[in-house]
Amino acid sequence: MDYRKDIDCLRGISVIAVILYHLKFEYFSGGYLGVDIFFVISGFLITSVILKDINNRNFSLTRFYERRIRRIFPALIFVLIFTYIFFNQIYLENELKELGRSIISTILFYANFFFLEAGSYFNPLNERQPLLHTWSLSIEEQFYLIFPLLMLIFRNNLNRLLKYTIFFAALSILLSQFGGNLKFRYPFVEDNFSFFSIPKFAFYFTLTRIWEILAGCALAIFLNKNNRKIDNKYLTLVGYFFIIFSILYFDKNTFHPSIITIIPVIGTIFILTFSSLSFNKKGIFIIFNNILFLKIGLISYSLYLWHQPIYQFLNQIYFINFSLNNKILIILIMIIISFLSYKFIEQPFRKKNVFNRKNIYIIYISSSFLAILYFLNVIYYKDFSKKYSDQIVDISKHRNYYLENDFNCSSNAEKYISPNTACILGKKKKSELAFIGDSHLDLITKELEKKLITKNISAIQYSYGGCVPALNLKVFNDRRYQCSKYFDEVLEQLRLNTNLKKIILFSRWSFNLTGERFNNQEGGIEIGESHYFISINQSNLPNIEARENIIFGGIENFIEKIYQNNKEIFIVMPTPEMGWEVPNNLARVLYFKKNINKKTLSISKEVFIDRNKKIKNFFNNLKSKYNLKLIFLDDIFCDNTRCYSHKKNIPLFFDDDHMSSEGAKLISLKIFNNIFEKD
């Protein structure tokens, strides 16, 4: 097919959308859809090239894969090498090993499955991974291992090939849309069918994403079969509108990929089908077809590769929310580096007179093999002991507190533990105490148990990670959680167990109330997705005021039921949240600056007070009504002006809000001093 500038301009728009999304520009919440547009363009262009070769009777799988290697691999391997070199300066041992694993997955083109194991693409923890974006390359290369073979098989029957392409695209989008209704055990289908039931693996999974590539393939086959180009400026304009609308109005809470994703896909198809040079440089079309987008489109592959590692490297160094001017400067740096990558890496390797087919295969195989060997050594054998001081290693080890201990007594979204089989903490005898809460309770149970043993008593642990102790609430848009069922059963256990005298509630109250992750106003924004609670009878998300009233009502209802069973109730009030993951960042600051002080990675006490003002007032208002005993933890973490993440260089948190062993020890002591102050 003839070269089309409008496609390169569309590539420029797409990569800009992705970059603005990753840099968190306010009005580009759907910028991640740039990848979906790339998928359609890729399917269209590559299928068009193959069809041209087939029509000329010179199609060769060997030559096809040679072209893919020339196009994809040289720039990719340079980005991977330099990413490791730079992040080796700022990453700690466990981070470097994880980076090594992601590099191997990228070289072998299974990065989509690697990042699938890490969780949601929209989780800020994953957003900070320097090679997260390589998942899309893996899907493309997996697809192109198979599809050219099918084209070769059906080269004499394009009608059948078109039907099969449309059929498999339909299956792929159906799996994207309804796959969440499926399960891996009999009867293999969920009891309650949901129209928007997208499987958690849909974003990264090859079979749920190839429909977008197949859409481009089908268009190329259709146009080739009919041997004509259709020009229509109105439908082209509709295509641009669909794309811009999607980029501006989609966000991380949009059901994606799903039937809704058809909007930007159709927009892309309209442009590929109906756009024409005859009107692209006139009127409104100049907005989408201009020299800026064209030049960016030409370097779009290098720009896509470089943007994420550059941004995350700067993000790791500065720990701040970049200003608009900072972000514009970062984008300019990305463009300059990408231009150099395009000119001195991409272009030379595409020239057959510089690197012939034999050489390109030798370079590809040998460099891949050596890189994999090197990073296997990093992961399994490299000695990091000389790189870091003992103090840095000790601080960083607190990051593993959760992983290195058995916290198996708490229910969560993936595992339901019935309250009638709840864990007993301490000595195995009749319990007079019950601790009720979420994962924040779970993370202090090791230290709680030590205190219980010293008093020769026991307690029952009722905890459900991700659920607030309340009645008749559910997590919005996540059917995995069974919060209402769990706390109903907890109440029944409290009613039946007359030995239980004292009930202690410990939860991340303010986060559960707002559903919004913590922003410390000093550059630290908590990693994680929003997590909203609504009534079990609702399906839509109410406004924040209505939602807070629903949650307050659910918590009070739960407390009231406990109170009616003649239990003494203690409320453990909120602990500070930091916004930063503490152990690794604290160790990193020490590594670079050679010194840390009390205020390093601390937050304003005013921010802490403001975050928890509503929940504090709520419990104060209930205090006399239900004879609540409020246990405040401010003095453990805060003075008059700041709240601190560490004491004597020992982290109090294992991430940004859950306690480390040291933090759990201090909280447990405070809780026991309050519970038994009269004993």
Image (tube, helix red, strand yellow):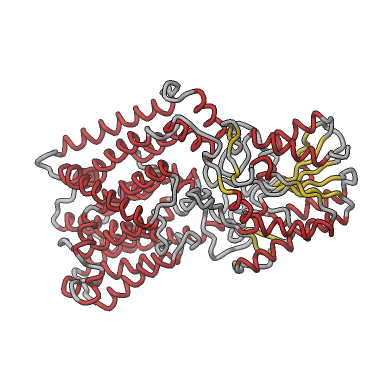
Quarter containing the N terminus:
bottom left
Q: Position of residue 180 (x, y in %)?
A: 54, 57
Q: Is residue 335 left or right of residue 646?
A: left
The residue at the point 57 percent across, 57 percent down is 516
Q: How many marks?
A: 0
Q: Nearer the viewer, residue 265 or 566?
A: 566
Give the residue at the far front of this rendering: 640
Residue at (30, 70) in percent of width and height:
270
Question: Of all residues shown, which one is farthest toward the bottom?
Answer: 234
**634 lies left or right of 37:** right
- Give the x, y percent position of residue 401: 60, 33
- Looking at the image, residue 283 lies above or below residue 163: below
Q: Quadrant of residue 274?
A: bottom left
**What residue is at 31 percent from the left and 52 percent from the top?**
329
Asked if residue 134 can be seen in this view, the reply is yes
Percent x, y of residue 394: 54, 27
Tell me if residue 42 comes above or below residue 356 in the rendering.
below
Judged left or right of residue 493, residue 605 is left
In the displayed structure, 368 sits above or below 23; it is above
Quadrant containing the C terminus is top right
- Residue 373 position within the rendered picture, expressed as x and y whole percent measured from the top left: 34, 27
Q: In this view of the protein, can residue 22 be seen by the observer?
A: no
Depth order, front residue of 557/196:
557
Q: Determine whether 465 is above or below 381 in the image.
A: below
Residue situated furthest left in the rendering:
353
Q: Nearer the viewer, residue 266 or 95?
A: 95
Quadrant of the image occupied by residue 271: bottom left
